Image: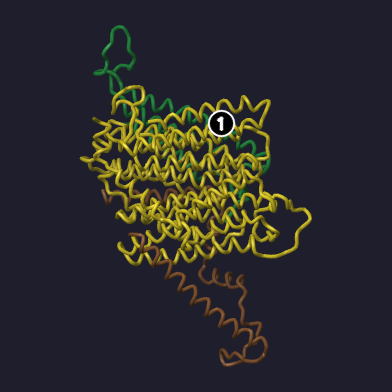
Chain colours: A brown, B green, C yellow
Amino acid sequence: MGIGGFQIVILVFLLFSAIFYIILKILERGEKSVKNGKSKVYACGEEMKAEYLNIPSESFHRILSKVLMLEKLKKIHSGELGIYIGWILIGMILIIIYVMNVW
Amino acid sequence: MIVYIGAMILVIIGVYTILNKDNIIKKVMGLSIFTNGIHLLLISIGFRYNYIAPIMTKFYLNFSNFAVDPIPQALVLTSIVINISVTAFALFLTVRVYEIYSTLNFSKIRRLRG
Amino acid sequence: MYSFYSIPVFIISALVIPIVGIKKSHLASYISLIASIISIVFVTATILDIMENGIVYMQMGGWKAPFGITVVMDGFSILVASITTILGFITTLYSIRYIKEKRSEYYSLLSILLAGLLGIIHTGDMFNLFVFMEVASISSYALTSFKRTDKAFESGIKYLIIGSLATSLYLLGISFLYAFTGTLNMADMSFKLSGMRGYGISLAISLILTGLAIKIGLVPFHTWLPDVYTSSPCPISAIFSSATNISFMYAIIRLILTVFISSNTIGVLILFGILSMFVGAVLSLLQNDLKRLLAYSSISQIGYVALAFGIGTYLGTIGGLFHMMNQAFIKSLLFFSSGIVIMSMGTSDMRLMESVKFDPVLKYSFLIGIFSLAGIPMFSGFSSKLIIYIAMFRYQPLLMVFTGIVSAITIAYCFKSYYLVFLRNAKLKPDMNEDKLCNVPITFKIPLLFLAFVCLLFGILPQFGIEISNFVISNFNNQLYIKTILG
């Protein structure tokens, strides 16, 4: 592995974060000029108003978890002990199948 | 041979009780049945028909050829002691849970979820 | 073999503390501190001994192997033992001011827990492993329900039923193996199992692996873990997520790689590692409670370690060892600093937390922990995760893509927790206890500073971690182990 590998990766990381910082500054300047009213944004065939430009992170998070059905995993952990031990037995059957094939 | 089948039946009854019954005390009983089945299996591994107990007396100073295996007996003694303390602690927790939730049905004791 | 004598030291202190604690309850913490300092001294002496000799062993009572119980230390054991004793000392130091109840059985139970974990690490006999596993488990059942709230009792009884199911499955597996081989010594069993085949032995090995996997927290067996970490006191959560996890991980790796070496079952950790990484990361993103988020994150990081060990290549094993070491220090740092935050805010729900003027030590140590967990360069998590990525790439490139996706979700929940606790501004409520947040007392500062220093050390100079892992792997030799013990 060596030490040189780590230092090259750190330098690449700093380089990319500098590039992304410059892109962020350019985008912020564009957003400020839209808010001033000096330029317009066209999307989906019509003009967008300034308050629709920034999606707040909480609604983005909620939409993403609904689309990918991540809330179902949270609902499965319902708190009953019987279902929890049922999973343990399913896992034990998986281990038994694996070890019997490999041994 | 029939002792082995009996011990495995006890183990299966124990696991079935922990899975399906709703009362906490029945689950603790199922845990106790499960561990007792394992103890019975362990003792019957070292058993030979018509051999003597592994105790050194005046007549049998060198009994290693015709005595029952003493190692599983030591394992089972240790395990029985551990099992007593776990059961005692489980019953203490049951009393405290009953004082706070006022029910012994495990489907209703679900304040931690997610 | 000096470090074995730290187990009687812990047990004697556990017996003395309740007697002393009747009259003066503040002496209990000092006795526990002295016991952990003595154990650190003993472990350091054994490290110097192992660097000379290779493997150090001792037969209890003078009975020769395979008839007696063997106590063995080699490179892997001494690494795990040193991390456990250091974390035990730091936790005792932190609990002096954290635990407000005057009952002195907390320190007694903590000493028994550390004695049990050290016993798991030192032993060379399979039934001895069962006994020490039970000792550690019973004290952790009692420590979970220490605070006597409703959630603590509920999680205590659920943990008790699942935990004793796990150790009983382990005992069932040992009884089958005793029937097949006739011995209980690890070296002797490894020697005898190399020539055997059969379905019965496969069943026995899978029962043993199931029992140990429940205690670690791999995914279909993880169901007790979030409840226990949420409702136990914060220093206990810290020691569960670091010392207990590492000791049981050591037990399962020792059994798979030394005793069951001829059965090639190292690949069973790949499937459970993949499931744990994904489920842990996704569920941690959806939580509102700070300690539950850290608990699911713990499941995810143990999935990384299991996957890295399961591959079986040299680079994977180095990555797994290094990440196991790092994750112990990072998780305990995060639990300690969130403990101070929760104690002062009065709640652990992140939606109700508002930003006040925090002490810079608290804010920056939490930030260092979050950066290490996410894998930012110059912190310790990056070094170990880079080695795991390279090991995955050489084995199967699809696994590296999957690891990258899970790391992206890791960064998401890391910064979510930091933002919700420290960065949202609001006004100060009148019933908040502000002095603990603004001036952190000295016994809280020492653990935070020490752990943050270790995280930065392994990040800026990763060659220390790689050297330690190299030494452990070069010391790990099955033929030498068997020949040294059996003579």
Furthest-top residue in this view: B58
Give residue C387's position: percent from left, percent from top: 37, 59
Would you place residue C485 above or below residue C216 in this image?
A: above
The residue that appears at 41% across and 27% down in the rendered structure is B76
C39 on left or right of C423: left
Residue receiving disc 1: B88
Q: Is residue A63 visible?
A: yes
Chain assignment, label 1: B
The residue that appears at 30% across and 62% down in the rendered structure is C395
Furthest-left residue in this view: C195
> In front: C96, or C256?
C96
Give residue C114's position: percent from left, percent from top: 50, 36
What is the quadrant of residue C397 in the picture?
A: bottom left
User: Pointer 1: residues within 10 angstroms few (<14), some, or many (20+)?
Assistant: few
The residue that appears at 48% across and 63% down in the rendered structure is C376
Q: Label 1: state its secondary structure.
A: helix
Q: Quadrant of the N terminus of chain C?
A: top left
Q: Is residue C174 visible?
A: no
Would you place residue B51 above or below residue C439 in this image?
A: above
C286 on left or right of C133: right
A17 on left or right of C423: left
Q: Quadrant of the C terminus of chain C?
A: top left
| Amino acid at dot 1 | Ala
Give residue C469's position: percent from left, percent from top: 36, 49
Give residue C373's position: percent from left, percent from top: 50, 58
> In front: C23, or A1?
A1
Would you place residue C75 above or below residue C414 in this image?
A: above
The residue that appears at 41% across and 56% down in the rendered structure is C462
